[in-house]
Image (tube, grey):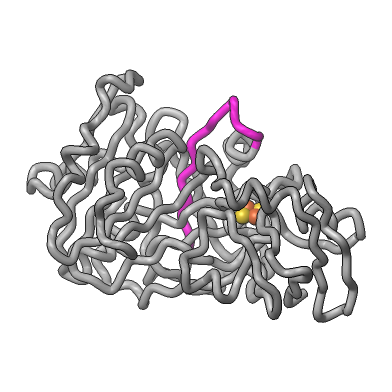
Amino acid sequence: MDLIVERPPAATRSGPMATGKFPVSIRSISELADDIRAFELVDPTGMPLPAFSAGAHVDVHLPSGLIRQYSICSDPLDASRYVVAVLRDPSGRGGSVGMHQLTAGDHLQISAPRNHFPLADTSHHVFVAGGIGITPIRSMMNAALARGDMFQLYYCTRSPERTAFLDELNPLVQAGIAVVHHDDGNPANGLDLSAVLREQPAGAHLYYCGPSRFMDAVDASSTHWAPGTRHCERFSAPSSGTAATRAAAEIPFEVCLARCGKTFTVPPGKTIVQILRENAVDVDVSCEEGYCGTCMTRYLDGEPIHSDSVLDEDDQQEFVMICCCRAKSKTLTLDL
Ligand code: FES
């Protein structure tokens, strides 16, 4: 695959309630590495797809009914197609295996692109990717290249055979701005993240994506970076919630749906999504653990307790993840 060299549209954050879903067909499927396939998605009638910015993802509605999120790793200026790369994980929850059963010509429903992981408005970036976590990073890295920004990539994988985009990254490795590190599946051989992240280059922002333990390691190695300069996208839940969120899980509250005027009680041990489902209110969900962003919903009144890993402080003033948030206030009013 070619490096993307054009300047992408400005990074934006966007929420799901403005999106819905639409049909695409799979124009081609290619092998990127062992167990990693790239899926090229296009409009079935040849029309352009909605625009996206580097770091964005789409919800893919699989024929089985599962909904999964995949980062778009193709050129943000090319609205004729989205390319997503998927690692087949036989021990996962079925989404990646379902994707790998698809063939060229199949049709799918997808959401409009959403971006919880945009490139910051700064000119120096440090990217850290673990395995398939390279997919949003690839798009962001190429956007940084197009902007003429300085960046450094650290990309950790098990082996060359399991490394997507290896050929296209080789020139960056030779230029000294990318490091591709293989650990042969042994954490003892892992990249020394503490050493890599010890210094925060002036003005630099950090972006990281990968498996849960990898994310926890990057988190722990970068706590000294300035507030607001660390950005991550998870594809699994963080290791544990805070004491506040655990305590909040024991307290019931009311959820009010402003558009239909219905109010339901959310008891301890149940989520808003579960209560809505029990009351035949249809909402899109996927991970139900607060890391994918599918259930993001605007709230209109009340004091939420957030426990997701998607929303930053600004977003938290406007949105909640209804699969995992609770409320300090007696009632939380949603724009539903
Ligand atoms: S369903 Fe994934 S964040 Fe709520």
Instruction: Residue 136: say if magenta.
Output: no
Tell me which residue sits at (18%, 52%) in the image.
152
Please name whichever residue, 138 or 165, is drawn nearer the observer in this view of the structure. 138
Q: Residue at x 86, y 63 (%)?
A: 281
Q: Position of residue 26 (x, y in %)?
A: 57, 52
Where residue 302 sits: x, y (%)? 70, 74
Residue 49 in sight in this render: no
**What is the span of residues highlighted in magenta in the rendered image?**
81-94
| Residue 261 % position (x, y) | 88, 79
Horizontal and vertical percent for residue 231?
A: 37, 58
- Please say whether residue 294 is visible from this viewpoint: yes
Task: Locate residue 36 relative to residue 227 in the image: left or right.
Answer: right
Above/below status of 98 relative to 148: above
Please report the residue visible at 53 percent of the width from the left and 32 percent of the height from the top.
88
How many dots with numbers?
Answer: 0
Q: Residue at x 70, y 79 (%)?
A: 301
243 or 43: nearer the viewer:
243
Quarter of the render that holds ligand 1: bottom right
Q: Taking 68 as reference, is 220 left or right?
A: left
Quadrant assignment, res 96: top right
Front-most of residues 117 and 319: 319
